[in-house]
Image: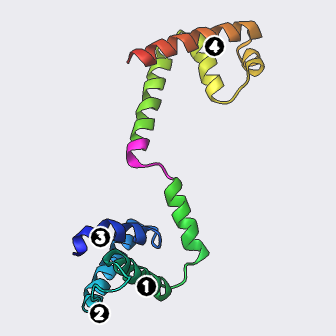
């Protein structure tokens, strides 16, 4: 009987618990409560089996919620920080993209490489022109050519 209602119990638990481990614990509590309450259900009247399961599950979830120690603001902040961190596979992908970009930048002509590296450091075209002692138009041309070459190299790999 209960196996057919596990998806319902999981959805209900997700409405009360944020973390997967807590959700699984709550589902277990719901299953135990249903097992204990099953002899009281006679299968008669207006209460269907699904409604009975939901009613016991909701009651169990509310009890579980009330029994938990109050959450502190610090815990919520830690959860928020943890959620904002990149997943390991996303970090690995970003590291690979960064390594590919750096490798492609290293293959640029010296003038183009200088301009790209300075742009990546946050300098604007006028500042780069002053640093390199060239005209702003020259910086614009070098960056335009560098972007085209980098695009070709990165899309080709």
Start-end of magenta stretch = 85-90
Are dots 1 and 4 in contact, CB under 8 Å?
Answer: no
Mark 3 lies on residue: 5
Of the residues tagged 3 and 2, which is closer to the observer?
Answer: 2
Identify the element where label 4 is drawn.
Answer: helix
Mark 4 lies on residue: 143
* Furthest-bottom residue in this view: 40
Identify the element where label 2 is drawn.
Answer: helix
Q: Where is residue 148 in the image (x, y as percent from the top left)?
A: 55, 11
Name the mark on residue 59: 1
Q: Residue at x 24, y 75 (%)?
A: 2
131 relative to 83 in the view: left or right: right
Q: How far apart are labels 3 and 2 at the CA level?
A: 18 Å
Q: Mark 1 vs mark 3: which is more N-terminal?
A: 3
Mark 2 lies on residue: 40
Are dots 1 and 3 in contact, CB under 8 Å?
Answer: no
Q: How far apart are labels 1 and 3 at the CA level?
A: 16 Å
Disc 1 crowd, CA 10 A, few/some/many (<14, 14-19, 20+): some
């Amino acid at each position: 009987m209960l196996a057919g209602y596990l998806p319902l119990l999981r959805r209900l638990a997700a409405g009360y618990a944020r973390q997967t481990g807590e959700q699984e614990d709550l589902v277990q509590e719901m299953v135990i409560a249903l097992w204990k309450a099953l002899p009281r259900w006679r299968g008669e009247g207006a209460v269907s089996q699904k409604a009975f399961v939901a009613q016991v599950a909701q009651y169990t979830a509310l009890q579980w919620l009330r029994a938990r120690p109050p959450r502190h603001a610090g815990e919520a902040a830690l959860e928020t920080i943890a959620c904002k961190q990149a997943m390991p596979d996303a970090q690995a992908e970003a590291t690979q993209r960064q390594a590919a970009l750096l490798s492609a930048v290293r293959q640029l002509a010296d003038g183009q490489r200088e301009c790209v590296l300075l742009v990546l450091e946050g300098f604007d075209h006028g500042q780069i022109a002053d640093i390199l002692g060239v005209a702003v138009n020259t910086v614009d041309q070098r960056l335009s050519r560098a972007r085209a070459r980098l695009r070709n190299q990165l899309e080709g790999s």
